[in-house]
Image (spheres, grey):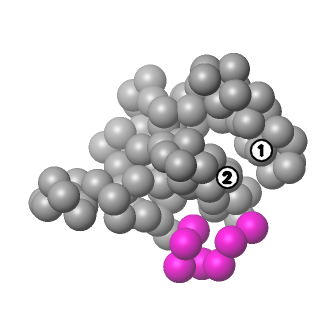
Amino acid sequence: MPECVKYKLSVMAHRCLNGRVPQYLATLCVPVALVAYRQHQRSATRHQLAVPSYRLSTYGRRAVAVAGPMTWNAVQTQLRRLDVTTAAFGRFLKTVMFSEY
């Protein structure tokens, strides 16, 4: 079951970066390259997302605004390509997830 959640969050983050979600969801996924004080870090070139800080360790890390970017950043670097379609990204992600288990 946790892998299904990771899959859904990763696909949602991919759609956010490609602009295929409503605006309220797209604001949750901010690339590190767009954050002013983090533009020159290595994570900016790896297509990672900025993870907002949270207070509660029980509920805070489960929020979509935190869990989505954390899951996207945990995906392998070669899968985080934005030039592939969402369907192809989902197939690649499933292949990687099945090979891990």
Which picture quadrant has residue 22? bottom right
- Residue type, numbered disc 2: Val
The residue under label 2 is 11
Whole-percent x and y of residue 89?
78, 41
**Front one among 42 and 85:** 85
Count up the numbered dots.
2
Q: Secondary structure at mark 2?
A: helix
**Tags 2 and 1 touching, CB below 8 Å:** yes
Q: Magenta includes 31?
A: no
The residue beneath circle 1 is 90
Residue 84, how many percent across, how many down?
84, 41
Of residue 32 and residue 74, the one placed in the foreground of this image is 74
User: Residue visible at 35% across and 49% down?
Assistant: 51
Residue 101 in picture, x, y percent from top left: 60, 23
How far, Cα to Cα, is label 2 from label 1? 6 Å
Query: Looking at the image, is mark 2 or mark 1 earlier in the sequence?
Result: 2
Q: Tell me if residue 77 can be seen.
A: no
In the rendered structure, which amino acid carries the disc numbered 1? Answer: Gly
Disc ID at residue 52: none
